[in-house]
Image (cartoon, helix red, strand yellow):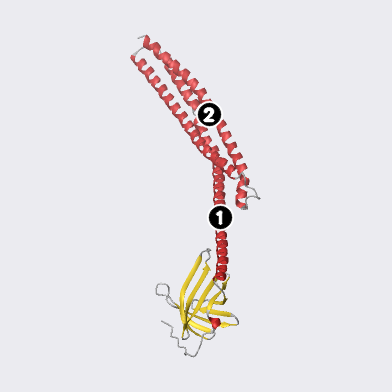
Amino acid sequence: MGLLLVFGPTIALAADLAGTFVGGGSDFAVFLQIVPAGEGRIMGRFRQVSVDNKGKPIVWDRPLSGGATNDSFVGKLEGNWENGGDIAISGDWKGGVLTVSNARGLRVSLQKGDEGQYNQRLNLLAKLGGGIQEQAAANAAAVARSQEVGRATTRLNQVRDRVARFTQQAPAHVERAAALVAKYPKFTQAVQAKLEALQAITARSAQAAGDRGGLAADINNLAIDARNLHTDVQNNEREFEGAAARLTSESQGAAVACKDASPARVEDSALLNECALVSATRKRLDETVAQARANYARFESRWKQEKAEQEAVFVAVRARMTQFSAAR
């Protein structure tokens, strides 16, 4: 809805109310031009530039039309339905200051000025915006650093937890292999007993030949079972070594990540605490791995010993079977 203004023809516009006015606040600048249009009417331009919370400039520029009486004016800042329509504006001139208010909630004191003074204010706003943007960038960088520190702390904590679980579970894992190794002698004893039974058969009948063949087959099957048992022990060791290699790599990475961590360089106490535990974590892992490897080496030595005894049995079996085959 337009603003209807009526002014008597004898009322003149004060000279001080015409011209260019400049003013603003800490985060905005206003430029107002007022030009007499005859018969108490005025026209001009209103421009307001402000800075948002991201440091970006916001420009609001409207044509001005209205009417004036001596030291005051009332009018509108012209708009359309796309930009919010007309905005009411008024101003009072007193003591060298033009106090301007508009329907957008603005109330500002302006003084006579020129574009040069207005540009000075714009330069100050640009510096303000630049400072806001720099601070925003610094804040974003600080947030990013904080997030990275948080992720690093979490990773270190997870590595420490995984190492702790590994070192706790390793003895039981190795013990399962030890239980398998304990069965090696039973296979050796079994094939030796079968060999003794085979050697005890001296007859050359078909029945005796069948019995010797059955015992030889039993010995062969026992040999296969023994090798399968050894494979199970090797698989147990490979599983251990795979987990140990992963955790060793992770703990080494943790040590590298914490290499430059010190109170002088890192402010986050949680990260410093995790880094302080890295050395002890690596030591515990290394000790666990070394002990397990010593056990696995002992297991392999035991297998070689039992395998040698079993091989001696296989040689004797082949010799015995060859003896009776040749005598047919």
Which residue matches tag 1?
Answer: 141
Residue at x 56% of width, y 47% of height: 156
Instruction: Kindly check if marks 2 and 1 are in contact, taking CB atoms under 8 A apart as contact.
Output: no
The quarter of the rendered structure image containing the N terminus is bottom left
Residue at x 33% of width, y 14% of height: 206
Residue 283's place in the image compared with 267, above or below, is: above
Question: Where residue 165 appears, x then y in whole percent?
Answer: 54, 43
Judged from the image, the secondary structure of the residue bearing numbered disc 2 is: helix
The quarter of the rendered structure image containing the C terminus is top left
User: Dot 1: few (<14), some (14–19), or many (≥20) neighbours within 10 Å?
Assistant: few
Question: Where residue 252 appears, x then y in whole percent?
Answer: 57, 40
Residue at x 55% of width, y 46% of height: 161
Q: Is residue 46 in view?
A: yes
Q: Nearer the viewer, residue 214 or 302?
A: 302
Q: Cα distance, mark 2 to mark 1? A: 55 Å
- Type of amino acid under label 1: Ala
Which residue matches tag 2?
Answer: 299
Most extreme residue toward the top, as rendered?
327
269 to the left or right of 49: right
Mark before the other along the chain sequence, 2 or 1: 1
Question: Where residue 197 appears, x then y in whole percent?
Answer: 43, 18
- Type of amino acid under label 2: Phe
Judged from the image, the secondary structure of the residue bearing numbered disc 1 is: helix
216 to the left or right of 152: left
Q: Quadrant of residue 194?
A: top left
Q: Nearer the viewer, residue 171 or 153?
A: 153
